Image (spheres, rainbow, N blue to C red):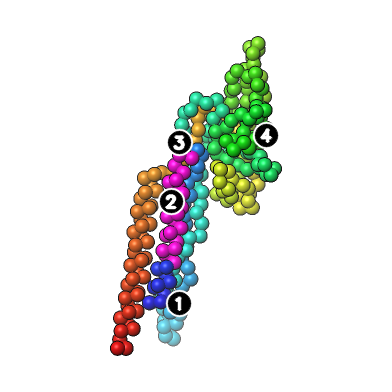
Amino acid sequence: MLRALYSAASGMEAIQLNIDNIANNLANINTTGFKQRRTQFQDLLYQNMVAPGSSASTSTEVPTGLQIGLGTRAVSNEVIFLQGDYQETGNELDLVVEGRGFFQVRMPDGQIAYTRGGAFHLDRDGNLVTASGDPLEPQVTIPREATKISIASDGTVSVNLPGQTNTQQVGRIELAVFSNPAGLNSMGRNLYLQTSASGDPVTSSPGESGAGTLLQGFLEQSNVNVVKEMIDLIVSQRAYESSSKVVRTADTMYQNVNGMVR
């Protein structure tokens, strides 16, 4: 019965973490470029009452054994990098990565961070920056007198200038591709940092080296599936309720045992 208490308690703790994860997914339904996380569980150690394959007699062995599990735990909540739906904005600085790859931005401390959020702005010097003011890497500067900004699918940034009939190229946006994007470290603000698990980034122009292409005037929405998250929430709620009933049942059994001495 003591095992039952601890196993049920481990289940309740793991389910609580899963509910926390679901809550974060639902809270970011409207976050541009957000990628949902999926909690993964793992069973704990087993107490071998009778080990499988142990001798039952001089000529026979136990085919299955008797093993008592000691609960579960949450081991990861993997980021699912499925493409989100597109929302047309008409803003010439809004971009979508169609396929693999991340935009690169330079943090105030000099580190390079990575993002799928393509809502860019211009700072006072005409540089392309994120909503937090972090500049795009490599830096792209738009002339103040530009009347129109065009961003091609291969990342080429061109502008129309007064008195000129031809467009002028002012820069190129590059994308970074990781062999294991799920290994990136989420740091908030739609940004990820490289880790040893993600591997080193391969930077290239959009459409090259496995990177996706760019689409101007659109934003990638969160890939959270509300219906699935609500179903997972209901399942988690029932699992938590079942584990709590195990705790109450084990407590009742202890109470009955303690009452036998009277």
Q: Quadrant of the C terminus?
A: bottom left
What's the amino acid at mark 4? Pro
Q: Earlier in the sequence, mark 1 or mark 4?
A: 1
Q: Are marks 3 and 1 in contact (CB under 8 Å)?
A: no
Q: Secondary structure at mark 3?
A: loop
Q: Which residues are magenta?
A: 10-31
Local packing at callout 2 (Cα closer than 10 Å; few below 14, some 14-19, many 20+) is many
What's the amino acid at mark 1? Asn
Residue 84 in the image: state x and y as whole percent: 47, 38
Task: Give me the residue at 35% from left, 74% from top.
Answer: 250
Q: Is residue 138 above or below residue 57?
A: above
Provide the residue designation for mark 4. 138
Residue reaching furthest right?
Answer: 110
Provide the residue designation for mark 3. 85
In the image, taking residue 203 as reference, residue 74 lies left or right, namely left
Residue at mark 3 to residue at mark 1: CA–CA distance? 50 Å
Q: Earlier in the sequence, mark 3 or mark 1?
A: 1
Q: Earlier in the sequence, mark 3 or mark 4?
A: 3
Q: Quadrant of the N terminus?
A: bottom left
Nearest the eye: 91 or 39 = 91
- Quadrant assignment, res 165: top right
Q: Is residue 72 above or below residue 50?
A: above
Provide the residue designation for mark 2. 22
